[in-house]
Image (cartoon, helix red, strand yellow):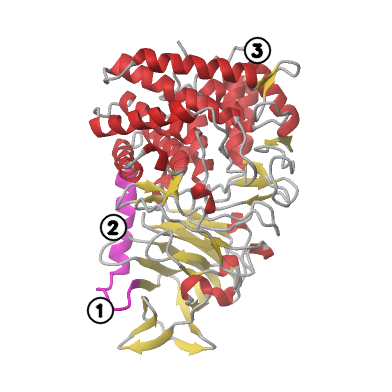
């Protein structure tokens, strides 16, 4: 069985990533990209679907683990009767080919160690042909080839590569696993010790750029490192998570593939990076965005592949049993075809944010924004699937309308404050029209709260963003009433649900956990409405949900007191950075009051 979701740590090279369990097993890895078929898929099945275990022969979970300083180099330590052993796991900067390096280091005594490598290409379905060439082990199946280089004697048994050795205090035993296309010659091997130095230097230099000096700096920096790790370096695209189908409801069907670039997620990630002082990453993201959305405005998708791919068809890997029998295991994401009007506001707000942060005006970007606004002008009155991608009938979601208002508002400010060419009166009129309709149709005067959609009683945690985006000031009684209503109706064990999974809203079976981003939004809203101590207390409770190496998944299940959903989740780490800034009294980049 795989570990608990919170038992996993992340390593990566900013083109792909792996999850390492506390027992020393790499249970998830896709080579060569985040969205490539997995070669270790035990996370979604069993060890027979592929994994790589290096741990003491005595077994068990590690006594402790940590990242080495402000890096993505993982150090895992076991204390055994024979002594203490450490495994150093990392992925060096991508050179000729992607590599995973594992260095076993003796800390004290003499510890017997076991290596067990089960390579399974195509999401655990294909067993490769394994052969030894010289001192290296090669595995080939179809388009994929892997090489394992180590001084340890290895042998094959039951389609598994095994090795046993003893490491004494002060000794270091390396393993290097390298992927390459099977039709090409084996790449030049990396030197594991040099690769370790290079990797540590890369992260040290990157973190130097961080300008955050407020409270909770360790949590903020770890979140920023995680967001950097989820960035596909060749294009600047940011994936929502490196995993697929980790369930929102243990044993249920709410399992989705998050290895793609959502415009919404990427936009708020841009904000977090700018808050941290990482302007180059923000520029790269803007360039990715411009390439991805190029074309007619009606063809805008809510998500794309890491290089801007548009076809992300969803299918089911029915040979995988699913994480803790949570089926189906989905590859691809059918939500790519949904209409989510809020995305238009997110994209235009991101462009505005770039200008405010000092990015030079971009005529191509402005041309695309003009097309998006013209489309939105003619379609904002339509129902859509909304921010949560509900797989039910389209509705007039209030958050979507608010974000349409944001689009108009930001365009007005870009024209009037930054001299961009355009018809300011036209967009001012649209802004007022949207604002008037939302306040008339999206507000329940009897309950003193905005609602999830027009004419329906349901609430939605996304309504907490109303003051943050400047639609209404935090002191407005309607904002205060909405915050209080959401606390009453969506709070579970001190954290927030996105919405109640009423079948009239969400037709899928089962429930889901508390959505961590929404709980961060509540901490922001409490702070903005003057309830500073409560906002701070909630934020610190959220920090306690992070695992031992500072990572958060998408949700928290209060019934089982476990993290659930894909891991680690950008949409959880981004609001952590934002809320830390707000509670620390830092300058807010994106908030612009309605004038």
Name the N-terminal-most of marks 1 and 3: 1
Query: In terms of depth relative to the viewer, which is nearer, 78 or 88?
Result: 88
Q: Which residues are magenta?
A: 179-206
Residue 64 vertical placement versus 47 (above, below): above
Residue 429 vertical placement versus 307 (above, below): above
Q: Which residue does the image show at 56% across and 23% down from the upper left?
A: 466
Asked if the residue under mark 2 is in contact with the one under mark 1, i.e. CB atoms within 8 Å, the reply is no
Q: Residues within 10 Å of mark 1 (few under 14, many from 20)?
A: few
What is the distance, in whole Å, between disc 1 and disc 3 at their CAs?
A: 68 Å
Answer with the quarter of the image where residue 30 lies. bottom left
Query: In terms of depth relative to the viewer, which is nearer, 525 or 304?
Result: 304
User: Which mark, by number, is residue 360?
Assistant: none
Asked if the residue under mark 3 is in contact with the one under mark 1, i.e. CB atoms within 8 Å, the reply is no
Q: Residues within 10 Å of mark 3 (few under 14, many from 20)?
A: some
User: Which mark, by number, is residue 477?
Assistant: 3
Q: Which residue is mark 1?
A: 185
Q: Secondary structure at mark 3?
A: helix
Residue 362 vertical placement versus 150 (above, below): above
Q: Is residue 560 visible?
A: yes
State left or right for residue 399 relative to residue 288: right
Name the N-terminal-most of marks 1 and 2: 1
Q: Which residue is mark 2?
A: 198
Query: In terms of depth relative to the viewer, which is nearer, 582 or 32?
Result: 32
Judged by depth in the image, the label closer to the viewer, 1 or 3, is 3
State left or right for residue 554 relative to residue 33: right
């Amino acid at each position: 069985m795989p570990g608990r979701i919170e038992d996993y740590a992340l390593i990566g090279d900013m083109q792909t990533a792996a999850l390492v369990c506390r027992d020393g097993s790499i249970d998830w890895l896709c080579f060569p990209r985040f969205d490539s078929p997995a070669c270790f898929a035990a996370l979604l099945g069993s060890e027979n679907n592929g994994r790589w275990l290096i741990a003491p022969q005595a077994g068990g979970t590690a006594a402790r683990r940590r990242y080495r300083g402000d890096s993505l180099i993982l150090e895992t330590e076991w204390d055994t009767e024979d002594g203490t052993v450490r495994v150093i796991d990392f992925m060096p900067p991508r050179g000729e080919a992607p590599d995973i390096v594992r260095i076993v280091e003796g800390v004290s005594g003499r510890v017997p160690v076991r290596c067990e490598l089960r390579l399974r290409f195509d999401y655990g379905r294909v067993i490769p042909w394994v052969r030894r060439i010289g001192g290296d082990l090669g595995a080939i199946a179809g388009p994929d080839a892997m090489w394992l280089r180590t001084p340890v004697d290895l042998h094959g048994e039951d389609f598994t590569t095994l090795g046993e050795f003893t490491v004494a205090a002060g000794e270091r035993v390396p393993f290097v696993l390298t992927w390459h296309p099977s039709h090409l010659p084996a790449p030049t091997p990396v030197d594991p010790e040099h690769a370790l130095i290079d990797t540590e230097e890369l992260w040290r230099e990157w973190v130097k750029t961080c300008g955050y000096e407020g409270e909770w700096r360790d949590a903020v920096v770890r979140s920023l490192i995680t967001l950097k790790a989820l960035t596909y370096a060749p294009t600047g695209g940011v994936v929502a998570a490196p995993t697929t189908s980790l369930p929102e409801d243990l044993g249920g069907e709410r399992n989705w593939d998050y290895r793609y670039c959502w415009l919404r997620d990427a936009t708020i990630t841009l904000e977090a990076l700018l808050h941290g002082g990482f302007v180059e990453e923000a520029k790269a993201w803007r360039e990715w965005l411009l390439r991805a959305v190029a074309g007619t405005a009606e063809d805008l998708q809510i998500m794309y592949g890491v290089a801007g791919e548009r076809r992300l068809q969803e299918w089911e890997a029915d040979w995988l049993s699913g994480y803790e029998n949570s089926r189906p295991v989905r590859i691809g994401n059918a939500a790519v075809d949904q209409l989510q009007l809020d995305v238009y506001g997110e994209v235009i707000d991101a462009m505005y944010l770039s200008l405010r942060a000092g990015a030079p005006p971009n005529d191509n970007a402005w041309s695309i924004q003009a097309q998006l606004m013209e489309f939105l002008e003619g379609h904002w009155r339509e129902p859509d699937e909304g921010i949560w991608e509900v797989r039910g009938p389209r509705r007039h979601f209030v958050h979507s309308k608010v974000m349409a208002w944001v689009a108009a508002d930001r365009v007005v400010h870009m024209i009037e404050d930054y001299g961009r060419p355009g018809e300011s009166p036209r967009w001012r009129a649209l802004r007022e029209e949207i604002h008037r309709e939302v306040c008339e149709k999206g507000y329940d005067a009897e309950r003193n709260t905005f609602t999830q959609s027009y004419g329906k009683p349901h609430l939605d945690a996304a309504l907490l963003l109303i003051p943050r985006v400047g639609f209404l000031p935090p002191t407005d009684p309607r904002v205060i009433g909405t915050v209080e209503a959401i606390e009453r109706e969506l709070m579970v064990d001190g954290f927030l649900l996105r919405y109640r999974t009423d079948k009239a809203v969400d037709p899928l079976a089962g429930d889901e956990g508390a959505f961590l981003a929404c709980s961060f939004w509540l901490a922001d809203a409490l702070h903005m409405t003057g309830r500073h101590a409560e906002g701070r207390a909630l934020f610190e409770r959220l920090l306690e949900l992070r695992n031992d190496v500072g990572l958060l998944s998408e949700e928290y299940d209060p019934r089982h007191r476990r993290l659930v959903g894909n891991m680690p989740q950008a949409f959880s780490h981004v609001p952590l950075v934002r809320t830390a800034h707000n509670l620390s009294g830092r300058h807010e980049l994106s908030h612009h009051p309605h004038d």
